[in-house]
Amino acid sequence: MFKPWIINQLPIVAGALLAVVVGLMVFLGLEYRLEVGAVQRTLEVEKRLSRLLSSIQQAEASNRDFLLTGDETYLQGYKKAAAQVGGEFDTVKALVTDNPEQGRVLNNLWPTIESRLALLEEGIAVRRSGGLEPAARFVQTNIGRNVMIEVGAGFGQLQENEAELLRLRQASAQRLINATSITSIVGITLVILSVAAWIWSVRRDQHLLMAATNERLRVEAQMRQMQKIEALGQLTGGIAHDFNNMLAVVISGLSLIKRRLAAGNTDVMELADATIDGANRAAALTARLMAFARQQPLAPQAVEMNKLIGGMGELIDRAIGETIAVEFVGGSGLWPIYVDPSQLESALLNLCVNARDAMPDGGRLTIETSNDTIDQHLARQIDMPEGQYICIRVSDAGSGMTQDVLARAFDPFFTTKDVDKGTGLGLSQVHGFVKQSSGHIKIYSEPGHGTTIKIYLPRHDYAEAGEQPEAIPAAIADHGKNGGQVILVVEDDARVRKITVAMLHELGHTVIHADGAAAAMRQLEAHPEIALMFTDVVMPETNGRQLADQALMRWPDLKILFTTGFTRDVILQGGALNEDVNLITKPFSLDQLAVKVGVAMDGDSQRQSAI
């Protein structure tokens, strides 16, 4: 067991050992680099020797061709090769300055090379003056061949010496590699052994620190959970209050309608309108609650951003009050986008209200729009897909956000406002809507310098998405209202199924109903006259999408109309309704149902399953 004072000195010992090992490794590394340089120089000498010998041989070959043919063009190759001999020789001589033996062999070889070149020149002169026969006799003396044999012997000696030198230098380099590896292993082993004892001595302190950290994290988690529960309590209390008010209108209105009708009094239109208004308000509240979970059904259409914001001026002014100046800077030539306009208005209003709360003493709120093209480089920086977007910037000169608040800004239930000032759903609703619309949202903020929130929504492609019609043609609406079709209603909830059947009866249709996919297939078998299947999407066992696919395989002319209260099911893509799917979201009115039935009956059933 190490004594405490020894353990405390172990880091110093380990550091000293590591310094020695590093110094030795640096020295061995420098030596290795020198050896590698020497090996490379040897390889270069071998290459240059080959070039020198090749130049001499090329000069001989061109000279021979001239002697045989007398064609002066062959002398061009000869002159070029002969001119290179001197340069190549000087290069080789410079490379072997560190090797006196090779230098001596080279110096002895040069006169022989010069002699060979002189004989080649002499042969050229003989051919030019006497013709072929004197030139042939000159070659047959074998003087040139004997000199070339001496040249070859000299080159052979040089190459043999360089090959041996290369072997020795490679072996030396390998020894340095082995020494470096052994030194590294020994040094690292010593350091690890020394440090291990010191690590062992401080593990107890680390355990204590980890325990304290875990306890702090546990307490923080408890506090966050308590805050969420408190926020959830506020939220549910507010929801219960609002729903009670709305249900009071609905229940009271229906009770009065029932009482008047029982008494024979048919003057109930005012009560019916009030009841429907209460139910619609409840449906709108449900949609807002679903927004932060990214589950609200969207009804996207082509939107001109500047026009939409311009039309919100009065609404924004009322929401933020008179102490805040609003400036709108609309970009020119703005591309259209494809979103749910009402949800976009709600998101912008949320951001404006947040900006108002960040400027309690007043200030300036700026809304800007522009076309932005996000290239690959910028897309990596801001973590979003590249492409063409409309950018909406909402900036305030308020208190700004700290990094801790920025990190949690989009969390549901998270809020920095007082208990009675907010539920923490505002930014999460905006985030949910933007993500459902295939967009992105970024926050840029600094305490004391305000906040800018940027919303990026993808550019609308008319050719791919098409325009959403602002109104259903009257012919289609009348088609639904005139009735006369045989419709199969598939709904697992008995109450919803009953009221849906009644509504379709009211529109004049013949209605058959089923509580699930199996019963629906049996009804289709028994009633081939069914023209339209009106099915819920979310059902146990077999969902509406699967049922539609099965039915269309057997009855390809069957029309399909889907209904759902959610957007996360398989018939929706990215939160937007696919243009090939006929769908009506719950709850729906009698007029809305009439229009959707008309659209479905006029559609191409073969395209309805292509989701």
Image (spheres, grey):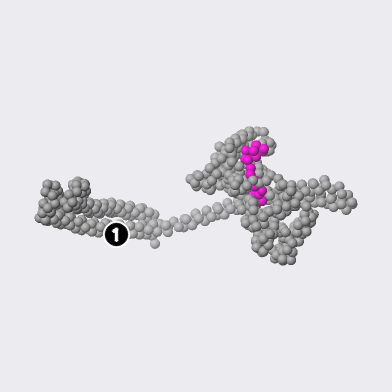
> Residue drawn at (19%, 56%), measured in percent from left and top?
159
Task: Tell me residue 23's x, y (percent).
Answer: 30, 52
Q: Amino acid at mark 1?
A: Asn
For the residue carrying disc 1, how many other residues have a C-alpha within 10 Å: few (<14), some (14-19), or many (20+)?
Answer: few
Residue annotated with mark 1: 178
Vertical placement of 573 versus 418: above or below? below
Q: Is residue 88 visible?
A: no
Closer to us: 576 or 495: 576
Residue 315 found in image quarter: top right
Is residue 69 left or right of 477 when viewed as pictured?
A: left
Which residue is more in the foreground, 28 or 501?
Answer: 501
Q: Element under label 1?
A: helix
Please state the extent of the stretch shown in magenta in the rendering.
289-312
Q: Residue at x 19, y 51 (%)?
A: 62
**Count of numbered marks:** 1
Please tell me whether residue 532 belongs to the stretch shown in magenta. no
87 left or right of 564? left
Q: Quadrant of residue 171?
A: bottom left
Residue in view at x 67 percent, y 60 percent: 556
Pick out the residue farthest to the right.
263
The quarter of the rendered structure image containing the C terminus is bottom right
Q: Residue shown at 47%/55% (left/top)?
A: 206
In the rendered image of this protein, does residue 31 appear above or below residue 418?
Answer: below
Q: Position of residue 544 (x, y in %)?
A: 67, 60
**Residue 165 position within the rendered picture, expressed as x and y whole percent measured from the top left:** 21, 56
Residue 299 highlighted magenta (yes or no): yes
